[in-house]
Image (cartoon, rainbow, N blue to C red):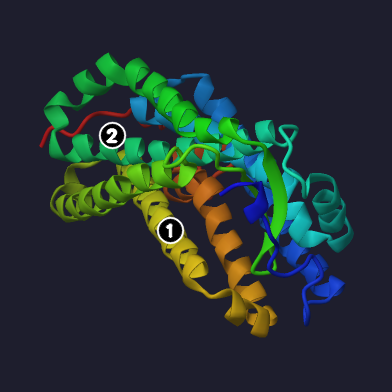
Amino acid sequence: MDGADINQSGSCSVPDVSETSKLIKMIIQLSYILPLTYIYIKFLVTVSRKNSIYSDTFFTLYIVDGVSSIGYIIVEFSIIRMMNFFTSYCEWIISIFCVPTYLLTPYFYLYLFFQFMKIISTVTLCANRFTSVFRPVAHNYIWKTYLRHIIITQIIVSALFSTPTLTGPAYASIYQNQPYINYVHNIPYFRTTVFRLIIMIPSLIFIIVSNIIIISKLSKISSNMRKLETSMVSSTIFISFGFILVLMLSVIILVISIDFANQHPGFFEVFALFNQIANDFYMISGPVVLLILDENIRKSILRCSLKPRRGSITQVHTITG
């Protein structure tokens, strides 16, 4: 795509969607985003202290996942999501950035960087739990030996896959009555879309296959697993299903025609809202599963427990049978 190809399908002011409904949508989303983000940040701070509960490499990977998740939420809500909430803000952003400019490039680069980081982080967490139940003897050695290399690789791959955004200026526009940010594609095939396919297709296959194996294996060995280990596996499965759901909804949005979106703006607005909520929960709800399932994590993060017990600290061990 070049500069001449840039156009808009729809406007910031969507027919049949009032400012009141946009305000309600903002209240709904902020009502769960703010507390979940707070819980995630508190979780990351607690995990970073490296006490006995969080000694497993799984929690180090969770720190990386948390940074990518919270980074994405901050970037998303600073411009794109606010354009959804406020028509005047949307029109102001469009008026400034409707013409491609490199002033918007750093924002869009970070937006995609955190997306790629989250995808790779989901795969890494699945791989970590997969080895814990499928290769328990070698699990600790593998992850303690190569953990730093794995994290560095995550960052490098995410940074490289986001570099196509640097080859052309970015702009703000409207597609199917939804605001979005894109960039001018100056180099054929060197596009973030190509890199998305490169990373998402094998990621989807691995996540589905690994979770099927984990779930089947879990049913056989759950009696030998400590409660914290079960919580870690359950949290990873939850995140994986979130990834699959978000991917399915994103594909549906892409295949919906512009004519259908324009003819049924109310329906498409609700569907887009559902997609945003699903994406938000995929991004930041992981620690909630751990808090619900494990009492010691609740104690360490929230300083409270439904059933307090004395002197009970769960150590993380690799499964040996």
**Callout in the foreground (2, 1):** 1
**Other-residue count near label 1 (Cα within 10 Å), few / some / many at <14 / 14–19 / ≥20:** some
Image quarter (top left, top right, bottom left or bottom right) of the C terminus: top left
Which residue is rendered at x = 40% and y = 23% of the image? 151
Would you call the spot at circle 2 few (<14 residues within 10 Å), some (14-19), or many (20 or more)? many
The correct choice, above or below, for 84 with respect to 116 in the image is below
Which residue lies most toward the bottom here? 263
Q: Is residue 160 left or right of residue 270?
A: left
Residue at 47% x, 41% y: name it.
Answer: 191
Q: Name the amino acid, label 2.
A: Asn
The x, y position of residue 80, in whole percent, is 71, 51
Which of 3/233 is in front?
A: 3
Amino acid type, label 1: Leu
- Quadrant location of residue 139? top left
Residue receiving disc 2: 128
Query: Seen in the image, is 136 located left or right of residue 230?
Result: left
How many circles with numbers are drawn on the protein? 2
Q: Which mark is residue 247?
A: 1
x 80%, y 53%: residue: 94
Q: Is residue 313 visible?
A: no
Residue 24 position, x and y percent, is: 79, 69
Classify mark 2: helix, strand or loop: helix
Up-down relation of residue 60 to residue 10 (above or below): above
Which of the 4 quarters of the picture holds residue 130? top left
Viewer-nearest residue: 88 or 207: 88
Q: Earlier in the sequence, mark 2 or mark 1?
A: 2
Q: Disc 2 and disc 1: Cα gap in Å?
A: 22 Å
Q: Is residue 155 in sight in this rendering?
A: yes
